[in-house]
Amino acid sequence: MLVGMLRMLPVLLLCLPALAQSSGRVSGVVVDARGGEPLARVQVQLTGTAFSAVTGATGGFAIEGIPPGEYTLHVSTVGFRLLTRAFVLGPREVKEFEVALSPDTFRQVDRVEVRSGPFDLVRQDSPSQLVLAGTEARNLGSVLADDPIRAVQSLPGVASNDDFNAQFSIHGAGYHRIGVYLDDFLLHTPFHTVQQEVGGSLTMFNSDMLEAMELHPAAFPSRFGDRTGAALDVHTREGSRSEPSFRAAASFSNVSVMGEGPLGKRGSWAAGARKSYLQYLIGRSSTDSSLAFGFTDTQGRISYDPARRHNVSLSYLEGYSDLDRSRARDRLGANAVMNANYHVILANAAWRYTPREDALLSSRLVYLRERFGNRNAQELELGAGYYGEWTWRTDGTWAWSNRTPLDAGISIRRLRDDGFANRYQFNPFAVRRLDEYRGNALRTGGYAEQSWSGWEGHLHATVGGRWDRHSITGLSVLTPQGSVGFVLGSTRLQFGWGQYAQFPEMMQLLSRTGSRALLPERATHYVASVEQRLGDRTRLRAEFYQRYDRDLLFQPLLDPRILEGRIFNPPLDPPWRNSMRGYARGIDLFLQRRSANKLTGWISYSLGYARVRDGVAGVNFPADRDQRHTINIFASYRLLPSVNLSAKWLYGSGYPIPGFLAWDGSRHLLAAERNALRMGPYRRADLRVNKAWAYARWTLTLYGEVVNLTNRRNRRFDVFNGYNSRTGYANLTFDTMFPILPSLGLVLEK
């Protein structure tokens, strides 16, 4: 046999030149589908062969000496969706490919969405906005929770200081003053949570279904209504119209599945589901099951083009959250929650019409329903509630000239809200109805914004306003807003001003502690910023803000305190009043780099002051979410085609402990000054590594994360448990948050 091979060697040597002359070449460039940035460190391979290459700094690749035949181009890198293309290579043929890779949080496309820069404004009418998209949102969401709103907590100027809650504050405004809009609909309670004293929450929508999130911290546009602090605009994405794909993920705390694909030739579908099994793990590893909180949710969207210039879509979301503390039944008091549940349904039907190139009309009908219920260890109802809403909204844009788009919209909201809360006493048995409310309301509103651009795009101005009315109060409010921006070379200057109104919740209007005469809360925003571009993908920004608040809702007589040297005992039903006014002022500084290659992230520092005055009690104090210093740092780097490393570090100097409290060195006691005590500084460092393995038709990605890498002992204020009416000593509960906590997640995508 060896002799036969030696005899064939001269023949093979004679054939090699002919084979070399007939071999072909494959080359091309790989870019990011969002913006067209060339992608380096991308693995390009011909499936089933040894032919491969890695893209360079310009995104280019070339593979030489390929024999004629049928091949499949296989393009992959961590953080982006796998792409395959079948082709036939003839003798001496050169194949050129232009490959657009979609981030794994973006719908699969085969073309580039052209953008002139990574920091270009999504909407010119907002003088202050931050955008989370692509791998940033994925890497910030945490393997442990995979929560998209928790990713927002790391943005410049945002403060949270709480490992257990997805809520956050901005410029001293609490979360109830920040609007979360999902596909142009203002969510009522956008979290998996339960109405009970053990605080914790997770975002109710799936991060796999999101296109992008835009945060507007100050002087936000008039299209966002009924909030006075800030606006978070969340967009869900369509499914892929090119080919079906499926994704399954599992971590220590939850599992999820998602699928998407084309719907005929004119539409697409996408659907996903998640389930938490953290409650089972805790229940089997701990004798105290009070943290056994779990959730299940499903989400889907269908989009279709029934005719040219028309698009219709239908989205559906349903979630269920529950708390089960039955293993601790013997240790629970009469008014402690043993079982709690929360159920939400959201359906959104939308129609979009483009009658011509300079006009766009969209309309949507939304249905929302929320239910919750709490029971104690004796299976008696502690409280329950229902919230329902029907909303119809229509928006339109008309560019009546090339530089003057006009935006306008109207909305009608039909609301229903009812609920109650009980308190029990045994020996003898007695039940007291603490609160009860029930009613319906009609909310109507509209807005208009006129924008103008000039000086070859170097100048932009917007003037707009809103009108809103509440049927229960019978009040109408007008809130104007305006902004102007200048671009001078690589420097951008922006200025914004706006007035905002937020009507009371229906429970505040209709309960025994409320009143139909309550006024809407009001705020006036001022913001000025200067931004310097340092190259194409880096910017340095300083943003100065000032907010004046008035008619803020407060219960002035709710808290016990020391008044004129004596203990003040609050009444049983302290009323809500529009008794507070105040201000918030400060500066946000950050340096940001955004790139699909190498380093991306930011370093931010915020200095803020937020104070309020209660007119009934005549006291001044720091706002409940006043925090002097906030530092948020995030960095992500794609080391290899299959490895991405990211890290974040968060610091907060500490929120006040709400109430009239002091510390005598050994215990807490009542005081004459409110919010004088503060929590200690919050510090947390997280490290994450993503490792991907790309196969012929599917990708396996392993996510490894260490939460609280330095094992910092962070604490949060939980609840005020009461006080001694004779000595004035107060009983407070504090929670210790996450210790150092490693976690793993696995994603299989086809």
Image (tube, rainbow, N blue to C red):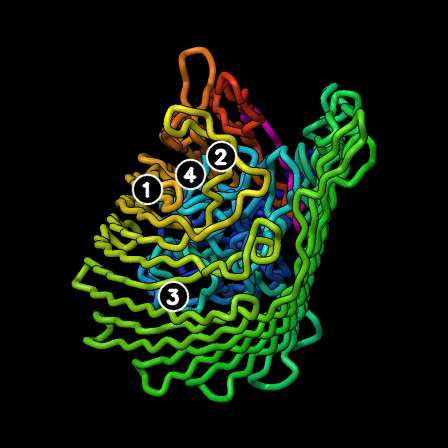
Q: Earlier in the sequence, mark 3 or mark 4?
A: 3
Question: Label 4: few (<14), some or many (≥20) within 10 Å?
Answer: many
Q: Earlier in the sequence, mark 4 or mark 1?
A: 1
Main SS, magenta region, reads strand
Q: Residue at label 1?
A: 611
Task: Label 1, secondary structure: give it.
Answer: strand
CA gap, disc 3 to disc 2?
A: 36 Å
- Magenta residues, start to end: 734-750
Q: Name the amino acid type tagged 1.
A: Arg
Task: Label 2, secondary structure: give it.
Answer: loop
Q: Residue at label 4?
A: 624
Q: Earlier in the sequence, mark 2 or mark 4?
A: 2
Q: Residue at x 68, y 56 (%)?
A: 418
Q: Residue at x 41, y 49 (%)?
A: 579
CA gap, disc 2 to disc 4?
A: 14 Å
State yes or no: residue 100 in magenta: no
Discs 4, 1 touching: Cβ within 8 Å: no
Question: Would you place residue 731 above or below residue 313 in this image?
Answer: above
Of residue 718 and residue 333, the one placed in the foreground of this image is 333
Q: Disc number at residue 559? A: 2
Query: Residue 25's x, y, as percent?
Result: 49, 59
Q: Residue at label 3?
A: 221
Q: Earlier in the sequence, mark 2 or mark 1?
A: 2
Q: Name the amino acid type tagged 4.
A: Asp
Discs 2, 4 touching: Cβ within 8 Å: no
Discs 3, 2 touching: Cβ within 8 Å: no
